[in-house]
Amino acid sequence: MITFETRPDAYHHWKLTFDGPVATLSMDVREDAGLSSDYRLKLNSYDLAVDIELADALQRLRFEHPEVHAVIVTSLKERIFCAGANIMMLRGSSHGAKVNFCKFTNETRLAMEDASAHSGLKFLAALNGICAGGGYELALACDEILLVDDGNSAVSLPEAPLLGVLPGTGGLTRLVDKRRVRRDLADFFSTLVEGVKGKRAVEWRLVDAVAPRSRFKDGVQARARELAAASDRPASGPGITLKPLNPTVTDAAVTYSAVTLALHRDKRTADLTVHAPAGPQPATPEAMLAAGDQFWALRAFRELDDALLRLRVNELEVGTVVIRAEGDRDAVLAVDRTLVAHQSHWLVREIIHHMKRTLKRLDLTARSFFAFIEPGSAFAGSLFELALAADRSYMFHDDQEENVVALSPMNGRLRAEGASASPAEARRDRMRAEAGPLLMSNGLTRLQTRFLDRPETIAGLLAHDGPFNAGDAEDAGLVTFAPDEIDWDDEVRVAVEARAAFSPDAMTGLEANLRFAGPETMETKIFGRLTAWQNWIFQRPNAVGAKGALQSYGQQGRPEFDWKRT
Amino acid sequence: MITFETRPDAYHHWKLTFDGPVATLSMDVREDAGLSSDYRLKLNSYDLAVDIELADALQRLRFEHPEVHAVIVTSLKERIFCAGANIMMLRGSSHGAKVNFCKFTNETRLAMEDASAHSGLKFLAALNGICAGGGYELALACDEILLVDDGNSAVSLPEAPLLGVLPGTGGLTRLVDKRRVRRDLADFFSTLVEGVKGKRAVEWRLVDAVAPRSRFKDGVQARARELAAASDRPASGPGITLKPLNPTVTDAAVTYSAVTLALHRDKRTADLTVHAPAGPQPATPEAMLAAGDQFWALRAFRELDDALLRLRVNELEVGTVVIRAEGDRDAVLAVDRTLVAHQSHWLVREIIHHMKRTLKRLDLTARSFFAFIEPGSAFAGSLFELALAADRSYMFHDDQEENVVALSPMNGRLRAEGASASPAEARRDRMRAEAGPLLMSNGLTRLQTRFLDRPETIAGLLAHDGPFNAGDAEDAGLVTFAPDEIDWDDEVRVAVEARAAFSPDAMTGLEANLRFAGPETMETKIFGRLTAWQNWIFQRPNAVGAKGALQSYGQQGRPEFDWKRT
């Protein structure tokens, strides 16, 4: 069983050091501390264990170290920055393990860009030596890249020519879409095993600058200070501490304080339940600081994130997940209002973006999600995003109209078209809907993605006076189906059974195509186009067959290819 | 060997009839006239042979029938519109054949949308009966969908639940992105074998209207007349006739009048050469009408299109293609100027959009393309697009500076920022670059895609006084490399040999990710995200294994799945 929690003093592979507003995250991979003893992590190559620590460090920088404004990403190995994903690890991995590994590393690199874009935390890749494959992809996720100019150190993406696979962590997409490297130069570069160094690397936009070894360290420090100076993070802490989640793990369930993942492996299904806040919740940033990681909005979403990751890598056959939200709906709405009211505070900002990233993790999880909205449920505001993220939602249509869902400013914001507006005016369409903070990978809110056909209705939904009963929610398109008492049991049972009986691959492909309607972004390109092609290649004998390039790398003789172009 | 040329009087599967401004394209598939005798095309199911005729009909409607303003797409079978791609055909196809089949059918459906968007030719799907899978995807490519309401006829996408594969012809993308069907409804619909009919199909936006059988034919005719009335096509013909291309086909080459495809199968390479116009070319639309399909701009690009299709399906191991343009550069530029000057004429418009579609076919061809620009070459204007479409271009740097490339308004248009501007002013950046007519799938010109990093330079390039010699072209970024006489032979030889030695799958994935930088459109989503996932599924044992859903469909017992979710 793979777990995702760690802490800096338990890291094997990274050193996190602090110097005022600049932190340094140094890769120093311990060869014998990978997830498996089948391979050694030579030359700062990495496996999932290394990336789990990186993801942890990024979270802690955001929550525990608000005084850090810039991060230098470098290596403690001489003349080696990072050799990329470990080839022996990839070679020995099942197809599913390869796919899950790439997905997590992609999410982690996107989290760096998220921190830069939304959290004022800038990243400077200080490439002190060879930077190959996934090493360069890590650098590409940083805001700027400095490469030592020593006649030897180069950046490279040798995956295609050496291994017959793609750079799988966003490299191709970031080359042409983020750094806007010219496509023909990107083509040449991506087939060049030895990579590109020095002045040419700058000219081709592969790195931002080079410096001779004598001036490299000072140059890195100076540039990091400049990046830090432009940050809007607070001048000093304290931050809050992310303590262990300590779930209770049994064979049948992972149980956290606000989240439960109950497994029904015989049916290949799970129940994922998120509980609304119970008891008083902090109403000010100061109270949130005091509550720390115990504040529901942070704790519940950290638990949800952990549950999703465990589900992905440890429960491969559990393909259909029923999501429920339970508890006090009004408590969720109250937390949402507090968050939105104080969203300019650094901690509130971090909490909101963490919720956003967790919901994205759900969008990107290759499992079918059905939301069941039953009496007593708490699908409101930020928790209603779970229903919007689900592939379908079923809402029990009770005669008493007590089963309701509700929206909050976390689902989308209203802005008055004129000088001011009352809720009544808003309901007369004088308000304009704006994106809320919980954006999907496609840059839209889940309401915007859902109502691509009629964006003008979103303002009316957000201005709706109070919650929606099942009939209203169905009419408004907020839920998929609203069966009544007579139909409910059969309908939801059949839906889950049918889903769990379909080809798992067809469902993965279906969901990957239907969940992300609307605009594409670099992020959706990475998870759509790039990942899908990589997964295809990861199935092809030319890569993974006995004589394929990935399987035979480092062995005598050349790979043998089926030359047919597809 | 598969060929792509046909003509209406040779169609086996479609009837094309005319009634003033409305044509009717009726599917009436002959069961025994597929590409192979291994399967029978029952229930208006189709294979590549059926789609080749559809593609031909669409071309002829555009060029031969300018008086047609709307097309009814329907079926001559009782109570069956179309059952989609033939399952036995898919089952018996190699992976490569499946992929090429889906690519061609996708291009054909996109050509329908291209005709609607750019050519005033509107399509009305008249679903007279069952419309399943690829049948519904064909309907989705039309502007409007009318479904007969007889209690039985439904639209459906049963691929995922029945066959364990995706609807592979854009269905999922068009559902959520073109028709903006709500994603949860799309999810439900795409898992529903029996599909959706009647009022619900309208409510869910799956079709535009339904009509009882008694009113169906009249309703279709009336709506088709309305669509026709809004067209900007000419009121009457004549059009021009697309005569057979009659290439000379030997074992080593396919030779047309202006295009040669020379095959070097032992090296897995080919030389694709396009010749510039020779002799006088028409200078007015009237002269073009008189020249008909012999006008170079149409003939050369029809030949290029045919050569690309033959390469794709008949020369599977030829992975690397060297493109050359030869002949009189100024003649190309003169044709370009004529085309742009008269682009509002219906025939000129058709010719330009045909050039555009052919170049898109090149972008979407899974082969590596290197352009070799050598002395005497004619890489100018519309033919320079071949170099821009190539993965790389190599330009011979001659001392005499006689080897040049040139741009024309076909590569991009200049618009004066002020009231008027001279070329000299344009060179001082008073001009703004606009998209030219030869757009890629991503909605940008190839120059815009190439210079994503510095779009402001495009105006200067377009305003450049005369052609670019090799040094200038390299400096401007118009070509990838410009080796001189000393380096040329070795450099281009090594480049081709190295390319031809890489994993064909890795090159396909690499190119699919690097060629389409910048914005994504429904079209790029279909070829990127959707196709890549489908290709992945087409490799998976859950679909194509002995007990996979596609292989075992129609046989006793249920498919057996590896339940692991990926």
Image (tube, coloured by chain):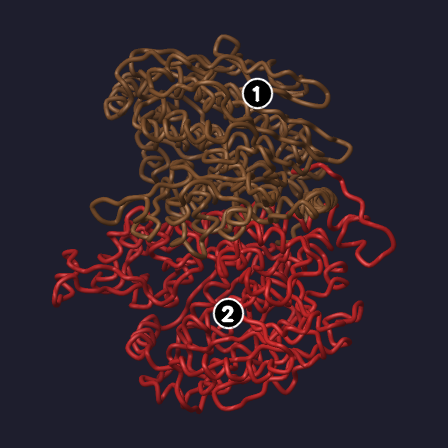
Chain colours: A red, B brown
Chain designation of label 1: B
Residue B452: % across, % down: 45, 53
Q: Quadrant of the C terminus of chain A?
A: top right
Chain designation of label 2: A
Asked whether the viewer can see residue B159, the reply is yes
Q: Nearer the viewer, residue B548 or A144?
A: A144
Q: In the drawing, does residue B166 fall left or right of residue A560?
A: left
Residue shown at 37% from the left, 45% from the top:
B463
**As drawn, which residue projects farthest toward the right?**
A556
Residue B381 is drawn in which quadrant?
top left
> Disc 2 designates what residue?
A111
Residue shown at 42% from the left, 79% from the top:
A296
Q: Quadrant of the N terminus of chain A?
A: bottom right
Neighbourhood count class around disc 1 (C-alpha, 10 Å): few under 14, some 14–19, many 20 upward: some
**As drawn, which residue projects farthest toward the front?**
B400
Secondary structure found at label 2: helix
Residue A231: % across, % down: 41, 80
Mark 2 → mark 1, Cα distance in angstroms: 48 Å
Foreground disc of the pair 2, 1 = 1
Q: Amino acid at mark 1?
A: Phe
Secondary structure found at label 1: loop
Residue A172: % across, % down: 57, 56
A244 shown above or below B137: below
B349 shown above or below B460: above
Residue B4 tag number: 1
